[in-house]
Image (cartoon, rainbow, N blue to C red):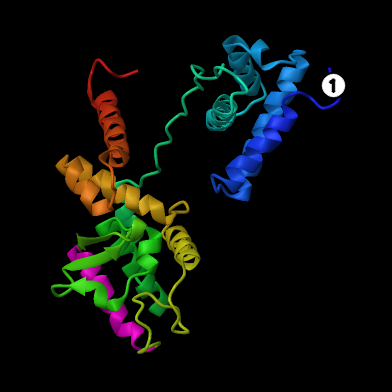
Amino acid sequence: MSKEYFITKDIAQYIEYIFQVKNLSPNTANSYKRDLLKLSTYLKSLEITLYNEITDDICTGWIGNLFSANNNPRSIQRHLSSAKGFFKFLKKNSIIESSPFELVKAPKTAQHLPDVLSPEDVEQLLSIKPEDALEIRDLAIVELMYSSGLRVSETANIDIDDFEEEMSFLRVLGKGSKTRIVPLGRYAISAIQNWIKERQKYSEESTALFINLKGSRLSVRSIQLRLKRMALKQGLPPVHPHMLRHSFATHMLESSGDLRTIQELLGHSSLSTTQIYTKLDYQYLVKIYDKAHPRAKK
């Protein structure tokens, strides 16, 4: 066996290819390199010195080795993707005739269901009695996010002139610079109107709806921290902004069952993204069933 292991030179050429030709970022290229070097080390431990000695059993053995080393399914999927891309490159350049990784599959990633507040928790959060201008603003932010299912970045970017039809609707600039129109509930409208009256004391020049006391647009980080503070003050565990969006979608689905409308309100380009909430709704139904059905009690 030569000093330089047989696969090392090809890995270097592949990393150069994906960096220079495929225009992948340095971080991504380095991630691929680390994954492939792990594969190289594994093959070396098996005393494999030629590509044609690599069988699909060896490939699946590597996957099992990664699993034994406590890599999570998402990490293993990335390793497999790196290996498949590398062997595809080798085949394209006539270094190998076929890829042993072609039919190898990684373990499925467990789908994480988002954290959701109960309607009672939301009611408790929004029952706060504002004691100063900042809390008036914070209540308006939370009412708006829960009323319309906004992302925290969308909330931070709202301008005063984004409202339409006497504040009944709001123009939202979402991901991919896509604009959507969302309705506002009466509690959100009232809270925003209260904030606008206070806001005039701090800035008449800024176009931003939500500003700090210096008149600058409120940052995403500031909204996150203020929401956490508000939740703790109301006797709740820390709440992050996306929980309000998830809660909006879940509560809407429980009441209406209209997944397509929820997709539009959330600004999802694909219905499959919105379908995560059907699983949340299903979990809710199972809890009710287990609690109520006489033959389901444990």
> Relative to 89, is 169 on the left or the right?
left
Q: In the displayed structure, would residue 2 be above or below residue 188?
A: above
Residue 122 position within the rendered picture, expressed as x and y whole percent measured from the top left: 32, 54
- Image quarter in which the N terminus is found: top right
Is 188 covered by the magenta stretch? Answer: yes
Q: Residue reaching furthest left?
A: 165
| Residue 60 visible | yes
Q: How many callouts does the rendering have?
A: 1
- In front of the other: 191 or 163: 163
- Residue drawn where x is 24% and y is 47% of the image: 263
**Mark 1 highlights which residue?**
2
Residue 141 position within the rendered picture, expressed as x and y whole percent measured from the top left: 34, 67
- Image quarter in which the C terminus is found: top left
Is 238 covered by the magenta stretch? Answer: no
| Residue 28 visible | no
Magenta-highlighted stretch: main secondary structure?
helix
- Residue drawn where x is 45% and y is 62% of the image: 233
Q: Residue reaching furthest right?
A: 3
Q: In the displayed structure, would residue 70 be above or below residue 263?
A: above
Residue 79 position within the rendered picture, expressed as x and y whole percent measured from the top left: 59, 30
Q: Residue reaching furthest front?
A: 94
Q: Which quadrant would residue 277 be assigned to in this image? A: top left
- In front of the other: 272 or 198: 272
Q: Which quadrant would residue 65 be assigned to in this image? A: top right
Tell me the crowding category of disc 1: few under 14, some 14 to 19, or many 20 or more residues within 10 angstroms, Cα based: few
Residue 71 position within the rendered picture, expressed as x and y whole percent measured from the top left: 62, 28
- Residue drawn where x is 25% and y is 25% of the image: 289
> Relative to 278, is 33 on the left or the right?
right
- The kind of residue tagged 1 is Ser
Disc 1 secondary structure class: loop
- Residue drawn where x is 47% and y is 29% of the image: 109
Bounds of the magenta span? 184-201
